[in-house]
Image (cartoon, helix red, strand yellow):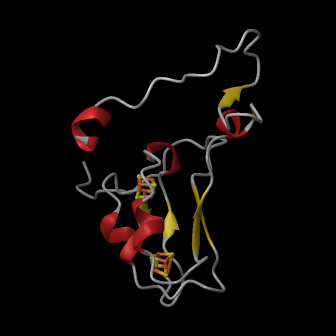
């Protein structure tokens, strides 16, 4: 039996959670450090951007984008089914495609607002 450990990517899915622009990336590895689900691994090729090895394990928390020191070097890409929708012009509410009877506008103040404004 061989005692080697192998790093194997998950099966490919249509999910492409984050996109790194290799032209802008400074290879600081900040995104690798802050990602709590270890979606990235450092690139074995020196000077190349991290590899998005486990995109389907992304929580879409945005940490990697927030901590990237180079604007535009990394951007999030939400799943396709969450990008398609429609907005109610009057309120800015967002609805998923396929909702036949969207609810009336929610006019209730956010929970806890009384405590903050007192
Ligand atoms: S959005 Fe969050 S979970 Fe997803 S790759 Fe970035 S840091 Fe990791
Ligand atoms: S944090 Fe930004 S600049 Fe640094 S390695 Fe990740 S994408 Fe590149």
Q: Is residue 25 above or below residue 118?
A: below
What x and y, as percent, mark residue 66?
43, 68
Judge by depth and name the residue closer to the eye, 54 or 23.
23
Q: Quadrant of residue 76?
A: bottom right
Residue for point 56% across, 80% down: 71
- Locate residue 89, reporting x and y percent: 77, 36
For the residue pair 72 and 41, the one nearer the viewer reads as 72
Q: x, y percentage for residue 38?
A: 35, 57
The front one of 101 and 36 is 101
Q: Does residue 71 appear to the left or right of 84 in the view shown?
A: left
Q: Position of residue 106 (x, y in %)?
A: 55, 22
Is the residue 76 above or below the residue 107 in the image?
below
Residue, x 68% and y 38% (percent of image)? 92
| Residue projecting furthest to the top | 101
Is 28 on the left or on the right of 95, as rendered? Answer: left
Q: From this view, report whether residue 25 is shown above or below residue 40.
A: below
- Residue beneath the point at 52% across and 50% down: 55
Quadrant in which the C terminus is drawn: top left
Q: Is residue 79 left or right of residue 44?
A: right
Total residue callouts: 0
Q: Residue at x 62, y 85 (%)?
A: 24
């Amino acid at each position: 039996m061989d005692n080697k450990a192998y790093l194997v990517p998950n099966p490919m899915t249509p999910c492409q959670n984050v996109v790194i622009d290799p032209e802008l990336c400074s290879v600081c590895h900040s995104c690798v450090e802050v990602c709590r689900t270890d979606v990235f691994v450092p690139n074995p090729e020196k000077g190349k951007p991290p590899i998005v090895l486990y995109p389907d394990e992304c929580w879409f928390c945005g940490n990697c984008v927030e901590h990237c020191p180079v604007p535009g070097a990394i951007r999030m890409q939400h799943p396709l089914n969450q990008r398609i929708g429609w907005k109610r012009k009057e309120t800015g509410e967002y609805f998923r495609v396929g909702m036949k009877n969207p609810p009336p506008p929610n006019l209730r103040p956010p929970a806890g607002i009384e405590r903050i404004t007192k």
